[in-house]
Image: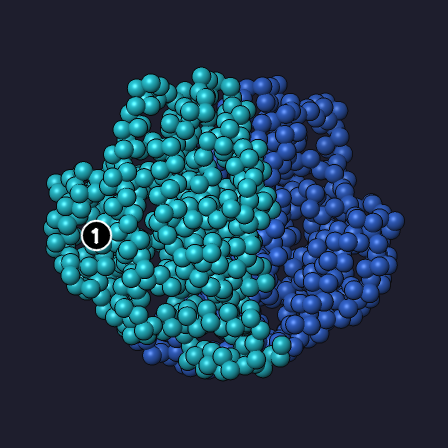
Chain colours: A blue, B cyan
């Protein structure tokens, strides 16, 4: 391609933006894994300056001209997809004025700091004025995005995280799932009680040495297909999967009192890591070569953790590895059912991040219902505690009205201004179940593969259907291409029924 | 200060350049300490792109105009120093055309790769054509720098690493030192032989567990004054001190067969680290706030390693820590003289980086004499092996004529195009001795402080004289301000005489 086309100018810009993103990603990893505390202030200043440079480069006046010109140049399919996604990212970046962004960033920083300060005491009243300001800004943002994208305000907010996701499609799916779960969860809990009456939950034979837990995590990652020449596992306070596709940095954290939460966390992050490592290498500098949004990313981690990692056949293979790596004493007297009783424990609770796969969606649906109301104005910020409490009582039988800390103040998302993100978690769980069902049709030997620790065919399927197409299609289109149909809650519901009532 | 002054524009630019440098420094540390091998290609691409962006920003046409305008604005002392050093850095960056830089970078990359390939077999003949090309480019570079700076070509090359260093000042100091060492080294070796006849060198009681060696290194770093809230110690193949002043990343490497090389390496890098950690924080984004060149940096590491860390009083304090941290068996039967016999061993050898403090300067003087001849044309590249051999025989009694690998092919500097750098090592050693002598006049209790592991007064002196003034003065002026006189070899000579013949 000639160096004078608009496409080639955008290609050069994309490489420069990628270099800044590479630096941002690795500085973020370093901050969480390695950085001493005193390095934080200058690191924050550096990241702020790099973000400003990035925004200035990506939104420079000539970029819009290049995009328009490139759209009329003769392009192949990959190039067209590249320009389409670049345009999407450009629209999302330019639709907010820098005056607005500055105002919003300042409000978000203040609000998040205030939240960290007031959350321990659950001081909702103290937090409310900042929250009201933030919601007002979010509504303003949603309207600006809606105008630029031709979407409704809440759809425009979701579109940042999952291109193509629309409330009109999601609301009925969530309604079906909610109605299913309200009936299903009590039955799953009864069934669990019956099982425990016959066979009590075995306590952990703690302590579990951290070095051995790490070795076990590495064994699992390697077997599942994580490429250690392009990634590594470290420790951080909040586990994450970061870095860049050629160098994926996963973290976990360990406690000596049990080994399953770290291991399941590693399986989860490995799902994210495999996605990143298997993106198409020639397109890493274009938005079209990146992972396709939060729903699909979460579907890959939940596929690894829940669809595969909580299945009995997985533990048929994994339990001997646990014995071998942690030592024979570690799970002495445990058999398959004892491990499964731990990894599949169902227990309604107040906290989303601690929830099991059965109750988690209700935490998300509650937030989806409230935040879409906050954006369309039908819910006022001051009403949130009452609505939250009413929904928690209805969905999970728990009241939060006297416990703001573990009620509407538990998550960082709203205090930091992220509205439209929550649905991705449960959409990801449903997509994972739908992918598993489709995969099982294509790979009849799937369960047997897992039973023997063979993940090649599974990963080949995921690579073909998900990983290699990156951001070529919208989230709903990607799902239809991979599974033959649009999102349908029945796969996730069937998965839960089979696993917990089967 | 108004946002409309040229100074304030340069201040904003300096913050942006600092952000890129921060990213470059940390990506470099991560590459050496953490990065899996497969991350290397994209990391190199990223660093190349960031370097290009840096150069473009720093040499944009308006920057020269801002500098000229700022030079006529009313500035305080700090601001004047900031503009002076920014101008120096700008001149050094803009005096080479980008056509020349591209040509030279390509030649350097090819030459360094060829050197890595041919060095193991010592294939000088295969390397010579690339080396001739590189020297031709270095002469062209030196002339371009000389024209821009009003210096002689070799001085212009040295000025990049040590502003103010001039061959006319250095040559007589090196001549005096060379003449001293040719007489001194045989006497030091005789004295060592006498001591060993009375008291043989004790072998190491290996193995030394790496975890314990690391603990010992941390104990020493902390006692010496390294701030672990603004830095850390890791492992890499080639030890270095990197990162940024607020977050200094030191590395070492360990062998289980002995513990002194890692420990002395840690002391050396701690000297670099203290300098970085104690630079003035308000000026980190301006060139004037950075460390003052390679000679002064090396003086700080060699002060820590050689002037302090090899002194008997240091080991009076350190040896009990070694016993405590490595375990009583580690140095069972060793007393102070046994440790000193190891750390002060004198032995002429072929390799510069393995040389002791007595023979090291002759390796450097040899290179200074040859490389200044390469630049002024009095030495032809093809003559280097004969000249090298003649000088090695004269200075150290060793021939390299049949061993190119351990002769003129041993260092990466020339193959990578760095000419004018070598003098800094020995200038640093001499500066360290001169600083110690001046410090001793100001702090009569210095030896006693070291004997008790008290480094506060020593560090306060270094902070006042060296660290806090950063790049405010040229290298020679900094030394005069710190010690009251210009560089004089007599302090280093007296140091060696007292230590090895005393």
Whole-percent x and y of residue A181? 73, 47
Whole-percent x and y of residue A22? 47, 58
Quadrant (top left/top right/bottom left/bottom right) for the N terminus of chain B:
bottom right
Question: Element type at marker 1?
Answer: helix
At x 65%, y 35%, the residue is A344
Q: Nearer the viewer, residue A360 or B348?
A: B348
Image vertical order of residue A323 relative to residue A387, above or below: above
Q: Is residue A351 in sight in this rendering?
A: yes
Q: Chain of mark 1?
A: B
Q: Nearer the viewer, residue B182 or B456?
A: B182
Whole-percent x and y of residue B487? 38, 54
Taking A123 as reference, is B439 left or right? left
At x 26%, y 47%, the residue is B178
Q: Which residue is mark 1?
A: B114
| Count of numbered tags | 1
- The outermost residue toward the right is A402
Q: Nearer the viewer, residue A436 or B359?
A: B359
At x 43%, y 54%, the residue is B296
Whole-percent x and y of residue A199? 70, 23
At x 61%, y 18%, the residue is A333
Quadrant (top left/top right/bottom left/bottom right) for the C terminus of chain B:
top left
Q: Is residue A13 in sight in this rendering?
A: no
Which image quarter: residue A107? bottom right
Image vertical order of residue B148 relative to residue B451, above or below: below
Q: Residues within 10 Å of mark 1 (few under 14, many from 20)?
A: some
């Amino acid at each position: 391609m000639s160096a004078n086309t608009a496409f080639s100018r955008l290609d050069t810009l994309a490489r420069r933006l990628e270099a800044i993103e590479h630096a941002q990603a690795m500085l973020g990893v370093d901050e969480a894994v390695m950085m001493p505390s005193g390095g934080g202030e200058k690191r924050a200043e550096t990241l702020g300056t790099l973000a400003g440079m990035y925004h200035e480069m990506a939104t420079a006046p000539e970029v819009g001209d290049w995009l328009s010109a490139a759209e009329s140049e003769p392009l192949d399919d990959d190039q067209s997809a590249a320009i389409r996604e670049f345009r999407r990212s450009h629209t999302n970046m330019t639709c907010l004025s820098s005056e607005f962004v500055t105002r919003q960033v300042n409000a978000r920083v203040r609000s998040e700091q205030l939240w960290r300060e007031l959350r321990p005491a659950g001081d909702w009243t103290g937090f409310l004025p900042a929250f009201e300001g933030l919601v007002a800004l979010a509504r303003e943002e949603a309207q600006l995005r809606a105008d630029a994208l031709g979407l409704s305000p809440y759809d425009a907010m979701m579109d940042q995280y999952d291109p193509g996701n629309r409330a009109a499609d999601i609301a009925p799916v969530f309604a079906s799932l909610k109605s299913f779960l309200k009936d299903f969860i009590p039955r799953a809990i009864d069934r669990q009680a019956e099982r425990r009456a016959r066979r009590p939950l075995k306590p952990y034979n703690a302590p579990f040495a951290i070095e051995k837990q790490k070795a076990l995590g590495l064994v699992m990652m390697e077997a599942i297909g994580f490429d250690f020449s392009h990634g590594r596992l470290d420790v951080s306070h909040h586990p994450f999967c970061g870095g860049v596709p050629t160098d994926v940095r996963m973290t976990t954290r360990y406690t000596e009192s049990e080994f399953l939460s770290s291991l399941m966390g590693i399986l989860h992050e490995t799902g994210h890591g495999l996605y990143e490592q298997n993106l198409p290498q020639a397109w890493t500098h274009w938005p079209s070569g990146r992972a396709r949004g939060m729903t699909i990313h979460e579907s890959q981690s939940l596929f690894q953790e829940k669809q595969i990692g909580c299945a009995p056949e997985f533990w048929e293979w994994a339990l001997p590895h646990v014995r071998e790596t942690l030592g024979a004493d570690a799970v002495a007297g445990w058999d398959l059912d004892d491990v499964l009783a731990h990894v599949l424990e169902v227990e309604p609770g107040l906290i989303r991040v601690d929830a099991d796969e059965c109750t988690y969606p209700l935490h998300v649906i509650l937030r989806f219902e409230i935040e879409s109301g906050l954006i369309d104005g039908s819910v006022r910020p001051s009403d949130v505690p009452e609505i939250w409490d009413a929904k928690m009582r209805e969905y999970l039988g728990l009241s939060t009205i006297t416990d703001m800390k573990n009620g509407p103040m538990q998550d960082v998302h709203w205090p930091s201004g992220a509205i439209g993100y929550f649905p991705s978690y449960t959409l990801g769980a449903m997509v994972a179940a739908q992918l598993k069902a489709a995969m099982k049709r294509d790979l009849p030997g799937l369960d047997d593969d897992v039973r023997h620790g063979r993940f090649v065919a599974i990963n080949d399927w995921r690579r073909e259907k998900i990983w290699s197409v990156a951001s070529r299609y919208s989230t709903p289109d990607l799902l239809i291409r991979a599974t033959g149909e649009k999102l349908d809650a029945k796969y996730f519901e069937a998965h839960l029924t089979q696993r917990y009532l089967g």
